[in-house]
Every structure is written in C-alpha cells, then in structure tokens.
Image (spheres, rainbow, N blue to C red):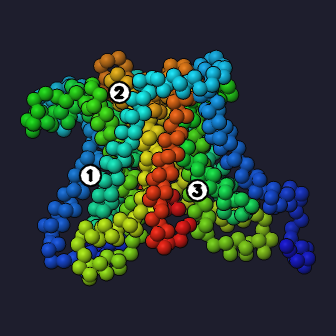
Amino acid sequence: MTETADAGLADAVTERDVPTRLSWESRSRRVVTIYVPLICFLIILLFPFYWMGITAFKPDAELLDYKHNNPFFIQHVTLANIRKLLFETEYPRWLMTTMGVAVGATVLSLFSSVLAAYAIQRLRFRGSTTVGLLIYLAYLVPPSILFIPLATMVFQLGLFDSPFALVLTYPTFLIPFCTWLLIGYFKSIPYELEECALIDGATRLQILRRITLPLAVPGLISAGIFAFTLSWNEFIYALAFIQSSENKTVPVAILTELVTGDVYQWGALMAGSLLGSLPVAIFYSFFVEYYVSSLTGAVKE
Amino acid sequence: MDASVWTFKRPKQNALVRLLDHKPFLTFLCMLPAGLLLLLFLTYPLGLGFWLSFTDTQIGQAGEWVGLENFDSILHDRVFINTVWNTMFYTVVATVGKFALGLWLALLLNENLPFKSLLRAIILLPFIVPTVLSAIAFWFLYDPQFSIISYLLVDVLHLRTTYIDFLGTPWPARWSLIAANIWRGIPFVAITLLAGLQTISPSLYEAALLDGSSGWQRFRFITFPLLMPILAIVLTFSVLFTFTDFQLVYAITRGGPIDSTHLMATLAFQRGIPGGQLGEGAAIAVSMIPFLIFATLFSYFALARRKWQQGESND
C-alpha cells in the first residue's frame, strides 16, 4: 500500500488491525470475510441504479425480448426514451417546478433555522433548552399524520394546486432538522470571539453577520444540502396538494403522469427516474463529506 | 453594560439599531419565523387532525361533530384491522432486516479498506435518490413478465420453471415491499452506525486481544454495548419512519392486491384524498399516534437506559 493511500485513511480509526493482525487472519481469510460480503452489498445496493440506467437507453424491442438479447447489456443504445420524455411530456416543466420548490423551501428554512439556532444557542433566553427540545420533537412528527389536516388548510388558504403550498409546508420537516444541526455548529464556535466583538461595541446582529455566520459556513452548507435533497424527494405533500399536471413535482409527475394504461412504458419511466435522480446525485457528489458529517453529526447530537 | 468611558466612541445609533440590540426583542424576532412556520403548519394541523377525526368532514363540505363514530367504524372495518397488523409486521421485519444488514455493513466498512470515503459515498446513494424513483425501479424489478430476478432464476440458473408473480398475491407482495424498504434503509443505518463505531477507542480492542478474547466476544462485550446509545437513536428514527412509510407502498402496489399491502399512511391517504372522506382519513392517521409514541418510548428508553448504566453522563 502506498503512502498516499494510507494517509487518506489516517482519519479513520482503523489502524488497529495492522499491528494486531494475527497469523490466522491471512489474506485469503480477509478476502472471504470482508471483501466478498462487501462486494455483494455493493452489487445489491447499486443494481437498481444500473438497471434504471440501462433500461433508459434500451430500445423497446430489446427491452421486451430477453430470449434473444442478453438483458444485462445494451446492443443498440438509443436516446428515444430521453427524447420522448423531454419533448413529448412536460418533464422540463416538472423539473423547473421541483427545482423552484426545493430552492424556495431550502432558503426559507435556512433563514428561519439560522435565526432560531442563534437565539437558542447564543442569546440563551429563559427556557431556551425547552424550545430546543420542542423543535427536536417536531422532527419526530411524520408528514403522514399531517397531510390530511394540512390539505384542508391549504384549501382554505386558497393555495391548493399552487407550488407555494409546498414551499410553505416543507419547512415543517426542514426547520427542525436544520435548527438542530446548526445549534450543534454554533456550539462549536468559541463564545470568546463573540464576547470580544461585544466589548468592541458590535451589535448582536453584526456579530451574527460578521462573526458567527462566516464561521458556520460548513454547517450552513450541510443544512442546505440536506434541506434541498429532502425537499426534492418529498412526495406525500406534493401528491396531496397539487392537482394540475403542470404544477407537479418530478416524483409525483412520473408516478401519476407517465404511468398510462396497462402497458407500462418502462423505458420512459426509467429515463424519468434517472433524470429525476441526477440533480440530487450530482449535488450530493459535490458535497458528500458535508452530507455524511451532517447525517452522522445530527444522530450523535 | 458599557462603561460610560466607552459610550462616546460608539457611533451614533438610531432607535432601530438600539431596539434590535435589545436582547428580549432580538430573541423574539429571531424565533419569530421558525416559530410562526412551525406553529402554523405543524402544531395547528396536528390539533386540526384530532378535531377532523371526530367529524364527518368530506372534501368540499364542512363536517359536523360525530364523536367517536369514525373510530367505531374503522375498528369494525376488516381492511383497517388488517392494515394495522400489516403495518406492524412491515415495521418489525423491515427494521430487523435493516439493522442486521446495516450493522454488518458498518462493521465491514470499519475495517481497513482502500477508497473508504468513495465507498461510503456510493453506499449512501439509495438514501439520496428520491424514494419514489427508486421504488419505480423496484416496480420494474418485480414486474410479472419482465422481472430480471425471475429471468435470472428461471432462464439463467434454472432454479424455477415459472416466473414469480411478485406483486399479484398478498404474501409475495408484502415480502417484496419489505425487501425494497430494507434496501433503502441499509445505507442510513450503516453510515450512522459506522460513525458510532469510529468513536470506540482501539485500545479497548487491544486490551481484549491481550486477554485472549474471540472476535464474537469483542463484538458482544465491547462493540455492542458502546454502540448502544447511537443504536437507540437510529432505531427510534428508523422505526418511526418505517411505521409511517408511504412512498414505497404507494409507488409499488398502491395498497393492492385486494388491500393486502396497505400501511396505515396509505390507507389514510386513499380514504382521505381520492376517497374524499377526510374525517375517516384523519381518524386513521390519528390512530398511528399511540403506536408511534409507544415505539419511540420503547426503543429510546429500552436502549438508552444502558447509557447511564455504563456510568456515562446522560447529556
């Protein structure tokens, strides 16, 4: 193993089995007990994506005939499914709606969460720990319980069938998570920095803007990514509050608009799923480390 | 707070700046957006849900108070009773599966492996991708005619002679959904437990090795107890979200065949939104709450109790 590879693993606390490896823990035993199961896990976890990808680019003739074509590969790559999706359905429109809703909900919840987390962690008013606990409990209220009363509310507010209904309701599950994450981040910033600024005559809002926020950028990015992917993936509210085809979000639209009749258009369905997953996957791949740290950090808190 | 000596150095502040620096006012202002959104769209609907479950509200028609009628009717509804059993079965089996496989995967990832962060990133993919979209992929994998699983078993391995009808009959459909749920749940469990594993000090294992412990003993007496606190939290979340699952079932079977795979959430949706019986839907949704409270308290206290037994601080 090269130096660089070992350096990359330095942060992991796994060096223990280098010195303590026993004689019977030979290379072949390691292969059987670790690598073989790991590869099985990887194949099972990734196969649906491979299948999604390969089906999206397969012509219908190959797709429906396993006897003469090996189903695991493509003989003739086609873009017909993608073209059909982009030009014969309202897919671009759905993508735009989803993007707008996700960005709107993320911005709204980040703004509210930053202020709430700052108040709870730094302004330390009476009962701030209780408020923190209540916000944590709010995260445990699942959307499946809330969608029926929310649907009646959305209807009465005149927001039915409007993307604004989603922008306003998504923060109910985003704010608790983001606030909790940011409280943890603010806690890690030394309070002395703020005290110095207070002595220098800065106002509280100046401190938040000039000192706390710049130091909490990694936390903000984590919270933002999480909020974005959660709102991109949200399904039940979007299904219950949106009726007209042009206002649907991608997950809902694929399921309700592309499934027509008894003959399923598997090619188009898979192409839609692939395209709908790509934005989150790309977004995620840029910020994997933030994502993993927020996921594990939030659980550890 | 400032000594009078300092005041002349401060720039002249107008009333607005001074008001914003007044701590109680600032606190109020900071809590306002989050508080307002949560009270309006979370607390109020929660209460409204309870109220709706005692009325006969329908879509486009305000309801009247009917007392416990909705609960009475769903308790005599065979579909609802079956759904409750099915939801519990689904939750228990899927959670056990997720935790067994997720813990195994976490232990594998905790070994000294090359490309560790890349592996971690790839493994989280099923968790990132919108559930409905991966559910559609599973729907295709479970297709009666074009299922690749059936193809493998019948035409490649010759283990069966007929294609499996995954979603056409109740029990295969239930197991298929549970498999899809486990598939989606493994990454979250594995990655969070991996984080817990990495906090366990290697010196404990070294000491145990010197004492001549076996691999199982090290797992049983070091890894498992030290993992308990984080396991309890991950388990609580997992049980909560599996019990209230909606997307997978709605996307793959929509509760069919003959209402056998409904979860309480999908049944509430079916009765409430397309069926128009908001009161009855709300009653079904509200009946999830006792189960949720019980499951949360159980998984939290039964497991988190270990934390102070080990003499750690209980923060």
- A294 sits to left or right of B158: right
Report if residue A278 is visible in the image: no
Q: Considering the image in quadrants, where does the N terminus of chain B appear?
A: bottom right
Q: Secondary structure at mark 2?
A: loop
Query: What residue is drawn where x is 20% and y is 34%?
Result: B148
Q: Give the chain of mark 2.
A: B
Residue type of the residue flagged with mark 3: Trp
- B191 sits to left or right of A40: right
Q: CA distance from mark 1 to mark 3?
A: 32 Å
Residue A139 percent location from the top left of the image: 56, 48
Q: From the image, state whether disc 2 or disc 1 is nearer to you.
A: 2
Label for residue A180?
3
- A61 sits to left or right of A250: left
Query: What residue is drawn where x is 89% and y is 57%?
Result: B15
Residue type of the residue flagged with mark 1: Leu
Q: Give the chain of mark 1.
A: A
Label for residue A102?
none
Residue type of the residue flagged with mark 2: Ser
Label for residue B260?
2
Report if residue A172 is visible in the image: yes
Does label 2 lie on the same chain as label 3?
Answer: no
**Mark positioned earlier in the residue sequence (1 or 3):** 1
Query: What residue is pinned by disc 1?
Result: A42
Front-most of residues A271 and B219: B219
Q: Quadrant of the rendered structure where residue B194 is?
A: bottom left
